[in-house]
Image (tube, coloured by chain):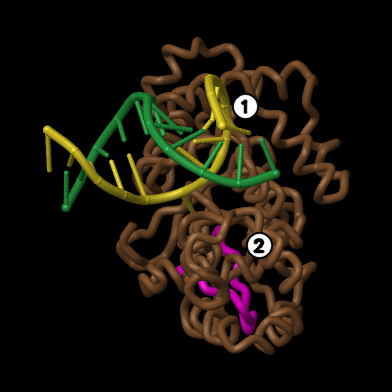
Chain colours: A brown, B yellow, C green
Amino acid sequence: MKYNIMEGNNKVIIEGIKDFDPVHIFECGQCFRWNKEDDNSFTGVAFERVLNVKSEDDKIILSNTNLEDFNNIWYNYFDLERDYGEMKEELSEDEILKEAVKFGSGIRILKQEPFETLISFIISANNAIPRIKSSIERLSKRYGKYIGEYNGKDYYAFPTAGALSKVDVEELKETKIGFRAKYVSNAAKRVFSGEADLNDIKTLDTDEAREKLMEFQGVGPKVSDCILLFSMGKYDAFPIDVWVKRIMEYFYLEEDTSMKKIQRFGEEKFKDVAGFAQQYLFYYARELGIGKKKK
DNA sequence: GGGCAGGTCTAAG
DNA sequence: CTTAGACCTGCC
């Protein structure tokens, strides 16, 4: 990627970067800890740091950070190495994707922390985004490390596997995660004990990694693919949630196509960039409400 | 109040 | 292997 970097005043400014729109990035369903501020910037937590991201003209302003953290953390987190141009062009050969890519042109897939992604997406099952977000905030506030104040608000890191593994299931339910509490507890214990090793799973190929992830209680096909895509760099994963199901059926397939068939269709059609296709389709379907139909 | 939301589990053909 | 029901919770 070609762009200019400037540092100063607790900020890093990226000038001339392409394919980077905070709204698209933080509202395309991949993350839960980024919140819009009054000035349309986003503040969020990752890697035990609070960051604010603002788009201004052709600049991206990262506040509450420095060049060292940019180089060590945010460059990778925002996947700035990747040139989205080629992949977008490839996807745009399909007429539907062409529109979806145009609509979500500033989407980037974040490289998130595997444990946080595992727990967050276990919580996401049969749940709504605002409630997922508030549960994760409660979880972080109660069991995560305090990392400081930004603009008058306190921020907490996502809890570690060790911290979560020690919490009683009934107490976990106070974060309003309901029946998912036992899954969260079980996952934390398995990771903390070393019975399951996320770093190890990350090194496997997509199918093997998916199989391993689905050994976690509360992790099925959709959640596993989200973890693969959003925290393990498996861009051939194609998570199918209700929105993607609707839009795929609406444009490519018949109504009531089984998840298996849609998954296979998506993977075969989009191959090694299926995950990117999924993000553009999800954002397109959700924001426009297309493909929405009554049961 | 019943339905539903970014699925998964369980039990059963 | 495919399919129906139940499921915490909060907002319509």
Mark 2 is surrounded, within 10 Å at the Cα level, by few (under 14), some (14 to 19) or many (20 or more) other residues, namely some
Single out the mark in the foreground, 1 or 2: 1
Q: What stretch is highlighted in magenta?
A: A10-23
Q: Quadrant of residue A266?
A: bottom right
Instruction: Find disc 2 in the rendering and name its residue.
Output: A78
Can the viewer see residue A93 in this picture?
Answer: yes
- The amino acid type, in three-letter code, at marker 2 is Phe
Q: Mark number for residue A127?
A: none
Q: Mark 2 lies on which chain?
A: A
Q: Mark number for residue A217?
A: 1
**In the image shown, does A199 or A50 lie closer to the viewer?**
A199
Q: Which residue is drawn at 77% across and 39% down?
A: A211
Residue A94 picture location, percent across and down:
65, 86
Point out the image quarter for the C terminus of chain A.
Answer: bottom left
Q: Which residue is drawn at 45% across and 70% down?
A: A285
Image vertical order of residue A89 relative to residue A218, above or below: below
**In the image shown, does A144 or B1 lie closer to the viewer?**
B1
Image vertical order of residue A90 relative to residue A11, above or below: below
Mark 1 is surrounded, within 10 Å at the Cα level, by few (under 14), some (14 to 19) or many (20 or more) other residues, namely some
Residue A243 belongs to the span the image colors magenta: no
Q: Mark 1 lies on which chain?
A: A
Residue A88 picture location, percent across and down:
68, 82
Q: In which quarter of the image is residue A145?
A: top right
